[in-house]
Image (cartoon, rainbow, N blue to C red):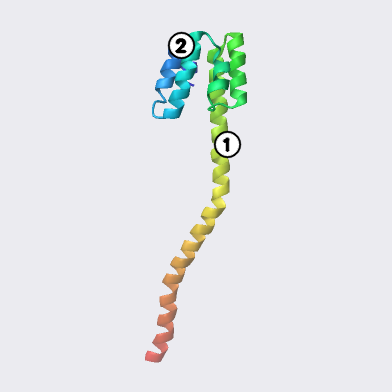
Amino acid sequence: RTMGFLLQAGINYLDAVTLACRTIAFFPDVKKQCMRVIEGLEKGDFLSVLLRQWTKLFDLVTIEILQAGEKAGKLDTAFALCAEQTETTARQMADNWMLSVQPAFIIVMTFFIGILLYQLVLPIFQLALILPDQL
């Protein structure tokens, strides 16, 4: 998404890639891969070819979309499309994770509520058994 915004704003292609790489500086492996991509861009290689060679960050569909964007001259649109696809995939993965964890969470909560009820009700029954003998 950042690359799409930078390219739409009219920033140079190489400068946009350099700025986008600076936003991920806290991932050392990614930064190394990004620097290789920048070096390749400075030599004149296509971004999609470099991403396919040097990075394992993007899936094949994303690289194909970027390649089509490069050929059509609409790379900003291609980056926006890739961002939407990635966000949709991440949202679906989060939803699937929640659906798979939800039953386990319900079982754990039921277990803790059962223990709590047992601890609350047991003294009442013990008291009920002791009181008739006391009277």
Q: Secondary structure at mark 2?
A: helix
For label 2, the residue is: 14
Q: Position of residue 46 (x, y in %)?
A: 56, 12
Q: Amino acid at mark 2?
A: Leu
Q: Residue at x 61, y 9 (%)?
A: 72
Q: Residue at x 45, y 8 (%)?
A: 12
Q: In the figure, is residue 67 to the left or right of 8?
A: right
Q: CA distance from mark 1 to mark 2?
A: 32 Å
Q: Residue at x 43, y 82 (%)?
A: 128
Tell me the quadrant of the picture where the C terminus can be found: bottom left
Q: In the rendered structure, which disc, 1 or 2, sits on the residue that comes first in sequence?
A: 2
Relative to 55, residue 129 above or below: below
Q: Position of residue 70 (x, y in %)?
A: 58, 12
Q: Amino acid at mark 1?
A: Gln
**Local crowd size for mark 1, using a 10 Å CA cut-off: few (<14), some (14–19), many (≥20):** few
Q: Residue at x 60, y 15 (%)?
A: 67
Which is nearer the eye, 29 or 132?
29
Q: Position of residue 35 (x, y in %)?
A: 45, 19
Residue 8 visible: no
Relative to 61, residue 76 above or below: above
For label 1, the residue is: 92
**Local crowd size for mark 2, using a 10 Å CA cut-off: few (<14), some (14–19), many (≥20):** some
Whether label 1 touches label 2, CB < 8 Å: no
